[in-house]
Amino acid sequence: MVLVLLAGAGGVAPQAARAEQPLRWAADASADVPYTFHDLNDQSRLTGFEYDLMQSLGEHIHTPLQFVQNDWDGLIPGLQRGLYEMVICGIEITPEHAEGIDFSAPYYVTSERIVVRRNGPALTGLDALNGHVVGTIKATQAERILANHPQVQVRTYDEETNVFMDLVNGRTDAVLIDGPIAQYYGATNPDLLVVGEPIGTVSYGIAFAKGKNAALREQVNTALEAMKKDGSLHRILARWNLWTPQTAAWAEDASAPEIEPTSWNDYVAALHGSSGWHAKVARYASFLPLLAKGAVLTLLVSLCAMVLAVGLGLTLALLRLYGPAPLATLSSLYVEIVRGTPLLIQILLIFYGLPQCGLNLTPFVAGVLALGLNYAAYEAENYRAGLQSVARGQMEAALALNMTHVQALRYVVVPQAFRLVMPVMTNDFISLLKDSSLVSVITLTELTQTYIRLSSTYFDYFGTGLMVGGAYLLLGLPFVRLARMAEKKLSQPHIRRR
C-alpha cells in the first residue's frame, strides 16, 4: 500500500499502479487432492493440477497471481465479500451454482465414478447401488444423481478423506464421486477399486462474484482458450494423469504427445513411500514447525479474546447489578442473546455479515472480536455471581469509611469477587482455547485446521491427532499453573499458617 501511495504521489497513473497488484485466487488446500494441496514431501509448497493451471493462467494474462487459503464453506462468501477475485476448487458448473456466482468457461471436464472395496459387493453401475449405503461429497452432482435413486441410502461428507475412510472401514458399501478424486483417493488405495463406466459429465469452472469482474472473466476465458490451443492445458493434465478420452473430446485435442505423468508418479511415490516407525517418526518431526505456527496463532487469538472477554464481562456484570435500569436491561439482553446463539454463527456474522454494513475486519480481528464478545456474556454471569457472593456488609463498611460507591466497588467488592471467580475464569480460558478452532472458517490456520490438513493429506488421524491434542494440552497447562499460583497468593490471608 505504501508503494502504491508513493507511486501515486510521483504522478504514476492509477491504472499502472493497479496493474502491479497481484490477482488473488482462493482454494481450500487443506484436503483437496489433486486440485490444490500441500506437497507430501514439502508441506510448505503448494501443488496440484489446479495450482499448476493457475500459474500458467497468470503467465497467459501477464499478471502475477496470489493464493488465498479459505475453508471450503467460506470460499464463495469470501468471494462475495471481496477477499479475492477468483475461486478455483473443483466447483461444478451447474444451474444452481450459476444463480449465486459467475463462471468462466470450463477448464476441465470429467465424470462421476464408482469406488468399492476389493473384497466388497460388486457394484458396477447406478442400478446396482440400490439397497446399499453410498457416500459422496455434499452439494455435488454426485449427490443429486443419488437423490434420484430413492432406494440408495446416501451419506454426505465435507471432506474426501472421510468419504473413503468410511468405505475402507465398511461403514458404506460404495462411493460415487468425481473422476479425479476417485483416481487419487480410490485407485491409490490397495483396499479400494474404481469400477464401472464413467457416469454423466462434470464441468469445472473458475468462480467470480455475481455481476462483478466481467472484464477479468473475459480475460480468463481468452487465456483458457489459448491454453487449450497451445497445449498448456494438455501438458498440465497429462502430468497429473488426468487427460482422458472424455477430456480430449471436450478440448478437441486429438494429439498424443509423449508426456510422462510425473506429478502423478511423484504423488503415488510419496503416498506409498518408506514405511516403518523410523519413517513415521521422521514424518511427525516434520509436522512440528507447522504445529508450532498453528499453536502460536491459537494462543494469540485466545489471549486477545480473553482480555476482551474479561474487560467486557466485568463491565456487563457491574452494569447489571449497579447501573441504571436501562443499561441493566441492555446488559441482561446482551447476555441472553449471545448465550442463546451458536458461536460459529456469530463468527460468520461478524466476518461475512458486517461488510454489508460497511465494516470490513481482518480475519484475526474478526476472530478475536467474535470469541471475546461471546465469552464476555459467560464471564459477565460468573462475575455477577462473584459480586453477589460478597457479603453486603462489605459494601456498607466501605461506605461507612467515607468511600464513594465507585471506590467501594473498586477497592473492596470487586477484588473479593475476583478471588472467588478465579477458578471459573481459568476454566473458561481453557474452553476458549479449544473454541478458537472455530476461527478456521474465516481463513485462520490454527491448530485444528493444521490437524485437518495433515491428517487428510497422509490419512493419519491417530498419530497426528495425538500430536495436536498434546499441543492443546501444553498450551493450557501453564495457564492452569499460573491460575493456581494466583489463587494461592490471593487466599493467603485466609489460610492458617503452620
Image (cartoon, rainbow, N blue to C red):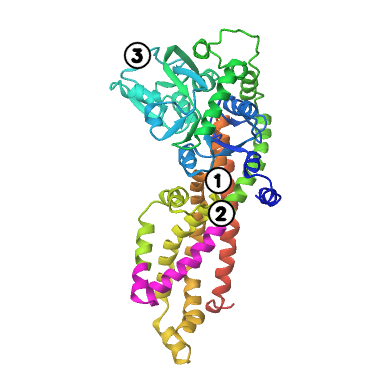
Q: Nearer the viewer, mark 3 or mark 2?
A: 2
Q: Give the vertical position of 372 relative to 77 (above or below).
A: below
Q: CA distance from mark 1 to mark 3?
A: 43 Å
Q: Main secondary structure of the magenta part?
A: helix
* Residue at mark 2: 301
- Name the side, left or right, on which 44 lies relative to 143: right
Q: Which numbered circle lies on residue 128?
A: 3
Front-most of 262 and 15?
15
For label 2, the SS is helix
- The amino acid at mark 1 is Leu
For disc 1, the marked residue is 444
Question: Disc 2 and disc 1: Cα gap in Å?
Answer: 10 Å
First in sequence, mark 1 or 3: give its number. 3
Asked whether, in this view, residue 490 is left or right of residue 283, the answer is left
Eye-nearest disc, 1 or 3:
1
Residue 258: image quadrant is top right
Per the image, label 1 sits on a secondary structure element best described as loop
Q: Secondary structure at mark 3?
A: helix
Region of the chain picked out in magenta, as a range: 303-330
Circles 2, 1 touching at the beta carbon (< 8 Å): yes
Instruction: Identify the residue at image location x=45%, y=52%.
Output: 354
Q: Is residue 308 magenta?
A: yes
Are the residues tagged 1 and 3 within 8 Å (C-beta)?
no
Answer whether residue 88 is visible to the viewer in this image. no
